[in-house]
Image: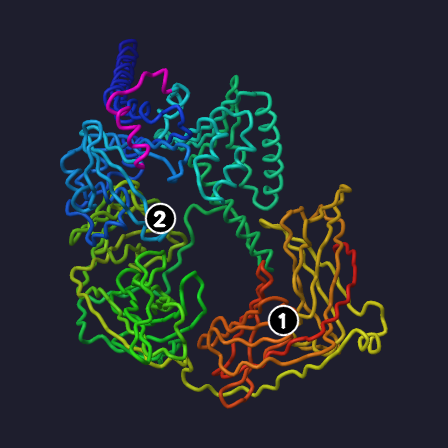
Amino acid sequence: MVSMKKLLVVVLALLLAGAASLYVIVVRPLVAPAAQTFAAEAALATPDLVLLAAVNVRQAVFLERWFLGAPVIRAGGPRVQRTVDERTLLEHLAAARIDVRRDVEHVVYGLYPASDRGIRHAVVIVGQFDAAAVERYLAGELGGVAQPLVGRTAHEVRRTDPDRCDNVTTWMITADPRWILISDPTAHAALLPRLMQVPPADEAELAWWRTLAHSDVLSVGMWRPKDAEHTVSSPMLKSSAQAMIAQADGIEHVYLGLGAKTVPPSGRLRLVLDATDASGVHRKLEDWQRTLQQSRDQWAKTAPSLGPLFDSIKVTAAGNRETIEFTVDRALASNLERAINELLAAVVSGLGGRVERSPRPAHRAERIESQPTVYTPVVDPARLGPYDATAPFAEEVDQVHGPFGVRLAAMRTPSVPDSGLELELEAFAGAIPNAGTAGERARLFVDSVTSVAGQELLRVEPCGRQRNTLPGLFTESGGQRLRATKAVRLVPGADPRALGSVNGHVELRLPTRVETRSVSRPAAGATVAAHGAKVTITRVDGGDVQYQIAGDRDRVLEVRALNAAGQPLASDMKISSGFLLGEGTAAHVQYAGVVDKIEVAFAAEEQPLRWSFKLTDMAMAGKPDSRIRYTPPDFRPYGAQALRRDVPRANPFELSFDKAQTFFTTKLDFTLRSPALPNFERAFTVGRLSIKQIELKDGTTLTPPSAWETPVRFGKDAKDGVLTTSLYVLVDAKPAPDSIKAVAGVLTMYFPRTMRTLHLDELVPGQRADADGLAVTVTARGRRSLTLQTSTAGERVIYVKVTDPDGQPLMTFGPNVTESPDGAWRFELAPQGIAGQADIIVAGQLERREYPFRLEPK
């Protein structure tokens, strides 16, 4: 027995020694910063440094491998190579033959006070590089101009952000076998000598930074927060920086770090403050902790599982250093999932629904996918059926091209500067074999817009997030049907009456041969591979499945789970994301039932298809509908004097405060009742409800700078001579519902003493009618939509009568009314027919009567 105990002690000692050796020899070198990283930090830490940030790439790769597994990377690079200006930093490195996981060790970023030439910042990428290959890429594909600088060759590269037309950046880049320096020209001249000859450590003032940053994956540290205002140039960012400075009084250093550990798996986010005035910062943190506790108590009533989330925040103090730390582990993630469900339950209950709260079962009740995708082993593109606009739920279109139907959906006035009319096209398709939800496989392009005289009207847009050259992607719109939209902008001054044609095309990459492969009773490590793509199962627990897709991911059409009977299970949740560095996808799916088999559909072969179209009908009329008999309401002048005659009561309106609810903001619900007065039943706006004060039960009051308010409209007909409407007001002060004692304000009602009619004889964007200081413009027109906008004083718009081209009245749903801060009102209408003209009834002289109120909740 004694020798057995000794043997166990020896084995345990050997295991501990082996673990320590493994950490010292393998793990620590993987995550500890290299010597060149110390040099890069010192080089960037000039006396005017404001912010230093770093990513420990080796540690990120190590953690990614630990948590997600090692992704399989295609040696051939991306299948579709993006243009130079569209490439990310990772794609630039890959194009320069740099393997991020293998060659890059650390990335360090420095930010400095801005100069008259703009922002000053620099990036140093630390690792092992082929400097000659990098320089060939800079001079070749990037068109960099070589310049000698302190015995080295730097390349000046101009890059235009394809999503931001005003963002043209000039970079200076120097490559070395151990590092790559990327910065603005001003910073480059100062930093390159420092990087080649590291400055003394005492000059860098990096001790505080290194003790924190070298244990985290992502680190951000700020020297002298009071200088933050000088690092930016735009007025908006300056305002934000000034607001931060106001809160940073007495703080010398600010640090934000994200770290992780593998056993047990957890993440750590921490904020560290080094103070010159420790007592002042400590008081601020005590105030913050009290606010946090109040928030915890308030939110815990709605979502009890949020309590542990708040409790995971820890605040500690050591001398002049205050640390706020937030730890995320599996228990916290579970609490977060439950908290989200509780918050959703609160939303549903607020809308009148109900969610039962019950313990989460070990395995979800089985639910079969109601509309699983059926893949056809072989598809002949020549046999694809044409789009059928007569099918149930199919959309009406202007033209049919192959399996797609295309139509002009809307015209709008310009929404961006230096632009003309906007057009919106829509394309639809029924279920296309093997296309699934389409995505990048099916795309809608607009190539040209011409006038009746043949002039090109499409605006040239080399950049912009929604630029004309980008396609609209098809997405599923129910029942495996597909839909895509694409908006384009025309040149300034383009006349909607002179449009001749809209030319474009639809592209489809059709999987013509599909192979389905599966693995039964899958376990971690199981793989399904075909045609250059590989799906690796990393975890299976009942209905919880985690997997990776690597290689040619486009070949994977679908990954789904089957039960023991071979039926596809419905999923309750799916989360997927790309790997941090390079290609590959990791996914986590929760299926409703126990998974017996994983099935993967692969595109073995695919064929690119293209259909061109040319739309020439700009009327957006569609086929005639059977007209619904409709009689417009009768409006007539009716002032306050007539009201006193017909309803002698001092206040003819009954307002009640029904309830208050809190979710992000506090929502106050009211009910308003009114006699069936002239002009009230269908008028767009008949008054305004304003909350000017909220009395709380603790004796305090909430008074906003400007009243919380909402317009008043009666959308329903009178019943027994009484009009009723429900109103709500959103209060950003967020008082708790049970803390409200009463609300006080004013109900203002409008009475038109005089009226007049503005006529729009053509409902095209830009058409305008005005009188007596009120202008009404058509800003958008769709197949079943019409949007009008006033220059100001939209409360004077009483009603809009829409008629068809023959002058017959059309029933119109709406309006959806939006008020802009500049005083403009927008009215969105939905005519049930072909809109030809519109008569806008406006008040000439509008009398206002105010009815003060103070109401307690029911």
Is residue 565 shown left or right of residue 138?
A: right
Question: What is the CA distance from the residue labelled 1 to the residue labelled 2?
Answer: 40 Å
Where 763 falls versus 335 (above or below)?
below
Residue 815 placement (x, y as % from top left): 57, 72
Q: Quadrant of the N terminus?
A: top left
Badge 1: how crowded within 10 Å, few (<14), some, or many (20+)? few
Which portion, as a residue range, is magenta? 184-204
For image coordinates 50% across by 37% down, the residue present is 241
Residue 220 placement: quadrant: top left
Where 32 falls versus 235 (above or below)?
above
Residue 290 placement (x, y as % from top left): 62, 32
Observer-nearest of 710 and 85 = 85
Observer-nearest of 465 and 472 = 465
Residue type for callout 1: Gly
For image coordinates 27% across by 44% down, the residue present is 523
Badge 2: how crowded within 10 Å, few (<14), some, or many (20+)? few
Is residue 92 shown left or right of residue 780?
A: left
User: Does residue 86 show up magenta in the picture?
Assistant: no
User: Does residue 191 show up magenta in the picture?
Assistant: yes
- Circle 2 SS class: loop
Residue 187 placement (x, y as % from top left): 32, 32
Residue 618 placement: quadrant: bottom left
Q: Which residue is mark 1?
A: 773
Q: Quadrant of the C terminus?
A: bottom right
Q: Which residue is mark 2?
A: 167
Is residue 289 shown left or right of residue 170?
A: right
